[in-house]
Amino acid sequence: MSTQPDRYLLITTSGGLNQQRTGIIDAVVAAYLLNATLVVPNLDRESFWNDSSNFSDIFDVDWFITYLSKDVKIIKQLPEKAGKVITTHVPRNCDPKCYQTRILPIFDRKRVVHLTKFDYRLSNWLDTDLQKLRCRVNYHALRFTHPILAMGRKLVERMRTKSKHFLALHLRFEADMLAFSGCYYGGGEKEMKELDEMRKRWITLHKKDPDREKRQGKCPLSPEEVGVILRALGYGNEVHIYVASGEIYGGEAAMAPLRALFPNIHAKESLGSKEELAEFSAYSSRMAALDFIVCDQSDVFVSNNNGNMAKILGGRRRYFGGQKPTIRPNAKKLNRLLVKRNKMRWEEFASQVRTFQIGFMGEMGIETGGSGIGLFHENPLSCICTNSTENKSTRRRYDDEDELLFLEDLSGYDDDDGIPRRLDGGRN
C-alpha cells in the first residue's frame, strides 16, 4: 500500500447485486492504482430494482476494511473537510494507463474524485499482482453480513434435507431481463406490448430484432428450454432443483413445463417462512445474496443465461476447487438446435446438446474465451494453482462466523451409493 494523504476515491456502483460486486472489486484495484484512500462504495439505489440497501446491509464492512488493510486504505465516510467532489466516469475496460491519464491529473488539482456507474470499468487484462488483488477482494474480503449468512446456511441445510445432493438453477426470466434482452418468447401481442412498455425505462436502449438476438445466443433460455437441456445432459426427474430467481414472467404457466420435467423444485420462498425472510424480502439485493449462497453451495450450478451471476459464480467455483459442475448454456448453438428438436430423434438431440456444451460445463483449465466484459471474473486463472498435488473433491459450507470455514471431503462416495453420479461431479 502506498496511499497519498488527502487523496480520496468515491465509487457508485451500477446494476444488481452481482454487477455491483464487480464494481466493488475493481474499485479497490482502481484505488490502489491511484494511490488513493477508498471510501466504502455506494450501491446503486436508482436502478430498476429500487433497492435502498447500503454496503453494510449486505457485506461485512469491518471485515472488508480490515482484510484489505495491507493493500488499500479504506474508510467508511468521506471526511467533512475533504473539499469539493469532482464527479466523472471512465470508459469500460479502462486499463492502468487509462486511469493514470484520465484520473491522476484531477487529483493534482482536487482531493476527491467520484466515479459513477462503476461497473466493468477496469480491463480484464492486468498484471498478475493486480489480478490477485481482485481475487482477494472477490473471494475473501467481500463477506456477507451475519444475518444473510445465517439465513443462507438455513436454506442450504433445508435443501440437504430434501436431497443429499441438489442442483441450483439461476433462472433469469423476469420481465426486466426479457425486456432488456429484446427477445420474444411466443406470448403474442400481450407479451410484445408489455415488454415494449418496460423498455421505455432505458432511454438509451435501442429496439432489437428478436430473431437476430436469438440467433446470436443473446436470449436467456426459457424454463422449458432449460428443462429440456438438463434432461439431454442426463439429469432425471428425481433431481431436486433450487431455483434462484425473481418473479418469473408468465408466472406458473411459464414454469409448468419445467415442473413437469423436474417436479422437485424449491425456492427460498418455499424453504423459508415469511417471518424468516421478512428482513430480506423488501430488498432485491439481500434476496439475491441468499440465492448466491445456495447456488454457490449446490453440487451443480446451472444458469439459463451468460450474465453477471453466471460469470461471478463460475469463477468462484473454479477458484475454490473447480470440482463441482458449473453449467452455462452455449446459447448460440443450443438455440439453433432447440428450434429443430421436434424434428429429431431424442438420442440425436441429446448427443448434440452434450457436444455443444463441451467447454461450457465449468471444466478446469478450459477458457470459454472472448474479450467480453467480466472475462476475468469467470476465469480467474491468475489466482489458481496449476500444479496442485491435491485431487480431492470438496464442498464448502457456510458458518455464522465465516463464510468459508469448513471443508467437507466428498472423495469417499462410490458408484454404489445410490447418488445420481452427475450431481456428484461424475459421469452419466
Image: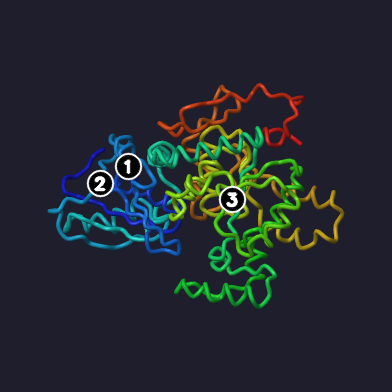
Q: Residue 251 at x, y = what percent?
A: 63, 62
For marks 1 and 2, give the CA distance.
Answer: 8 Å
For marks 3 and 1, give the CA distance.
Answer: 27 Å
Relative depth, front residue between 48 and 12:
48
Going by the picture, which residue comes out furthest to the front?
Answer: 275
Indicate the secondary structure of the residue bearing disc 1. helix
Indicate the secondary structure of the residue bearing disc 3. strand
The reply to whether dot 1 and dot 2 touch (C-beta < 8 Å) is yes
Amino acid type of the residue that numbered disc 1 sits on in the rendered structure: Val
Q: Residues within 10 Å of mark 1 (few under 14, many from 20)?
A: many
Q: Residue at x 21, y 51 (%)?
A: 78
Q: Which residue is mark 1?
A: 61
Task: Identify the mark nearer the N-term, 3 or 1.
Answer: 1
Q: Residue 220 at x, y = what percent?
A: 62, 59
Image coloring type? rainbow
For marks 3 and 2, give the CA distance.
Answer: 33 Å
Q: Residue at x 71, y 52 (%)?
A: 259
In the figure, is residue 218 to the left or right of 23? right
Q: Residue at x 55, y 56 (%)?
A: 246
Indicate the secondary structure of the residue bearing disc 2. loop
Q: Which residue is mark 2?
A: 76
Q: Which residue is mark 3?
A: 170
